Image (tube, grey):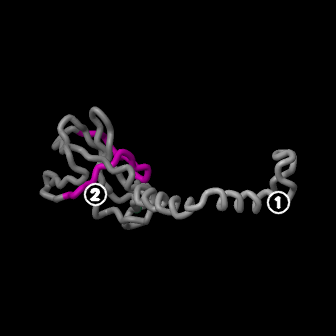
Amino acid sequence: MIDGPAYPGVFGPGTFPDGLFCRDAADSPGRDSLSIEEDESEKEEQKGLLCRRCHLLITSARERLEKDGSHLHTFFNPAGIVYEIGCFRNAPGCLPFGPSSTEFAWFSGYSWQVVYCRGCQQHLGWRFAGEDRFYGLIVNKLAEA
Ligand SMILES: [Zn+2]
């Protein structure tokens, strides 16, 4: 409840919420359509990327990052398995695991560490550390929210 003393002499008790909403809309014609457009571009940026298996939120589209000129990279490991990974600044849904290594470094100057999904513990990608830190996540293990 909003009580009188917080807004002395401006709004009577009980009239504050409705009165304020009406005034806002009338004072700013066109405001509503504009803010809807902004909401949609923001929604695109904030689109969540989920673990495809357990649907835990892993990261979001706004965390996408370009490394060596590209967001997406295709690599294969020493066993010949091909991975398509996307680079992300941050991925709070990932849990780094095990020692970091510089063997078979995909990004020169970076060491890597395996990361798992915090929800279902499947392998989602790697965390790279060098002049900065970022995540390389296997794109077909993620789903858009
Ligand atoms: Zn998961």
> Which residue is at 52% across, 59% downward?
35
Quickly name the residue at label 1.
15
Residue 22's spot in the image, x, y percent?
A: 71, 62
Q: Amino acid at mark 2?
A: Ile
Which of 45/125 is in front?
45
Q: Is residue 134 above or below residue 80?
A: above
**Horizontal side of residue 98 vs 14, given as left or right:** left
Q: Nearer the viewer, mark 2 or mark 1?
A: 1
Q: In terms of secondary structure, where does tag 1 sit?
A: loop
Which of 138/101 is in front?
138
Residue 15's spot in the image, x, y percent?
A: 82, 60
Quickly name the residue at label 2.
138
Which of 40/56 is in front?
40
Range of the magenta residues?
83-101
Q: Amino acid at mark 1?
A: Thr
Q: Is residue 99 visible?
A: yes
| Image quadrant in which you'd find residue 139 | bottom left
Image quarter (top left, top right, bottom left or bottom right) of the N terminus: bottom right
